[in-house]
Amino acid sequence: MKGMTMMLERYGHGGDLWTAEEAFNRPKEQFLDYSSNMNPLGPPDVVKEILTASWQDIVKYPDPAVRELRLCLSRKYGIDPDSILVGNGAAELIDLIIRVVKPKRTGLARPSFSEYEEAVHKTGGQVTNIPLLPQHQFELQWQDVEAALPTADLFFLGHPNNPTGKLIPQSVLTNLLQSQRKLILDEAFMDFVPQESEHSQLKLASTSHDLIVIRSMTKFYSIPGIRLGFMVAHPDLIQQLRGQQVQWSVNYLAQRIGSKVLEDTTFEQSTREWLCVEKPWLIEQLTALGLEVAQSDVNFLLFSFPDSMGIQVKQAQQHMGHQGILIRDASLFEGLNERCCRVAIRLREDNERLLQALRNMISDLSRKRV
């Protein structure tokens, strides 16, 4: 059967509704997507207002310097606009910074977002692996980072990390910043972290010669189709990066939407209130099903099927897909095994549907084993 052999992450990511449509013979609009970590409260209402009111302005070229959005970001985070570079999503900025810095060997946590390694390999660089272990709740340990210091001239780390959802401990960050190695932090999910300002390294990056921070605006505001992200680094490096960036990288609508959603503090507060309630509830419910759930600092959860269930994630993905629910095969992240799965946290009604589908799957597959 066609759907039984097609890999949903054929392009390296979750959220591929087109491949899901082909695999499960179901219109893409009918899927409940847990494979993509978007804010279920979004997009904010202002996005619709901009698309309705500003569509005629697409006859104009966008601002090549992205001045309005950079100024809005500068005000929101209290940093120099000259330390900000806006890009066509975080993906463009990941590729751009590695092309410019050209590290010989990069320290990467395992598991972590695959695009870090892809960017390194495109420039001919090598990778040093740093393990994230379940016995430490996938939290980065300084002794493991320290072991990579002799070989790595740059470290590229998720903060919080994807797919584990864990922040880097402040002590590890402090030691790394004192190591005289360049450090790139991907803070794509930092907006979801309680006390974000206490954990984000944006302000430090704006004046540091060794620290670069990348942020996404697509996850928190649920606008992945717009493609929008930004990078913060010392102004000298930002100027160098801007010279290597593709012209007109950030389109007019993306610039307008980015500027306006930053003003929506009510949306921010509603998101944090929702997640504060829904995350512990969903962890409790998944644990009650017998699943091994890792603690998370953000809006998605990594869990594994215990050996006793005899369920592999690819089986689960197919079974759930035929029920109209997409989950992420986390075994595709280096460092995780064939029992690992990642799901987003969504609204209660959707989460209840997810839980019922998981109950059905566990029951059905258990019966088949008997």
Image: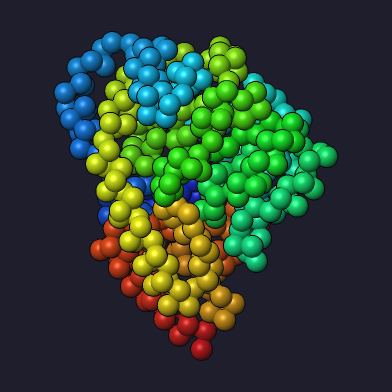
- Can residue 337 be seen? no
Q: Residue furthest bottom?
A: 370
Relative to 103, say whether 370 is above or below: below
Measured as percent of width and height from the top left, residue 100 is found at 64, 21
Q: Residue at x 28, y 31 (%)?
A: 263
- Can residue 281 be seen? yes
Q: How is the image coloured?
A: rainbow
Q: Residue at x 61, y 25 (%)?
A: 208
Relative to 36, say whether 48 is above or below: above
Measured as percent of width and height from the top left, residue 309 is found at 53, 79
Measured as percent of width and height from the top left, residue 328 is found at 47, 56
Q: Residue at x 55, y 50 (%)?
A: 167
Q: Residue at x 61, y 58 (%)?
A: 138
Q: Nearer the viewer, residue 324 or 80?
A: 80
Q: Residue furthest right?
A: 150
Measured as percent of width and height from the top left, residue 183 is found at 65, 34
